[in-house]
Amino acid sequence: MSDMWTGEKVRLRGVEPEDWEGFRDLAQNTLDVRNADLVDPPRSAESFRSWTAERAGRPPGGEAFRLVVEALADHAFSGSVTVGETDSRAGRFKTGIEIIRDHRRKGYAAEATELVLTYMFAEQRYNKCEAEVYAFNDASLALYRRLGFVEEGRLRQHGFFAGSYHDVVLLGITAAEHWATHQRPSVR
């Protein structure tokens, strides 16, 4: 493809104000939210509209950003992918992905993550990507391992929710490990 933000199944794009319903849908399934983060109290539709409008108005790039994962088949909002906690001196960043329940098991999360890795390694000169996943989140652990991430450690009883403490698994992939299984983008 001639667009580095488009794969075979998904396209990554900036947040648009009308994406507020997709972000609301992601937040409404508290079981899914708990797998990735802590559960917040319910938010109003206006809160989602203003949150999304603010993000849509941000300039592209920067040290932390969020992109919408859009399914190519129907151009539907399928989730989002984030880059954050960048350390340009050390050459590392963190990523995370969330996909709407109805769009899972279609390869969207893997492809979106691969597109972000390619951008960060090939265009931004980062050397390592890290991800933190709750130890009970088997689907996310399997996704990152399938993409070539290696378990680097475990933070024991690191997060508290649902009445108990939970371990967090630390995973990482270097640029060299990524390029060993993916073709570098062409210069053309």
Image (spheres, helix red, strand yellow):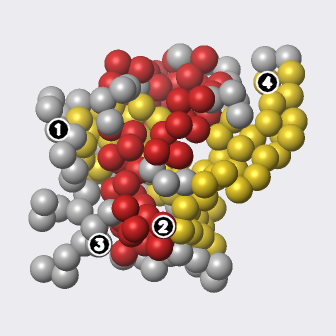
Label 4 amino acid? Phe
Residue hosting label 2? 177
Q: Does residue 59 appear anywhere in the picture?
A: no
The residue under label 3 is 184
Q: CA distance from mark 2 to mark 1?
A: 28 Å
Q: Name the foreground residue: 119 vs 60.
A: 119
| Marks 1 and 3, the one that precedes in the sequence | 1
Image quadrant where residue 94 sits? bottom right
Q: Which residue lies under the disc numbered 1?
A: 72
Residue 12 located left or right of residue 116: left
Amino acid on which the number 3 mark rests in the picture: Arg
Q: Which residue is mark 4?
A: 161
Foreground of the two, 147 or 121: 147
> For the residue labelled by badge 1, is the local secondary structure a helix, a strand or a loop?
loop
Lower position in the chain sequence, tag 3 or tag 2? 2
The mark nearer the N terminus, 4 or 2, is: 4
Q: Residues within 10 Å of mark 4 (few under 14, many from 20)?
A: few
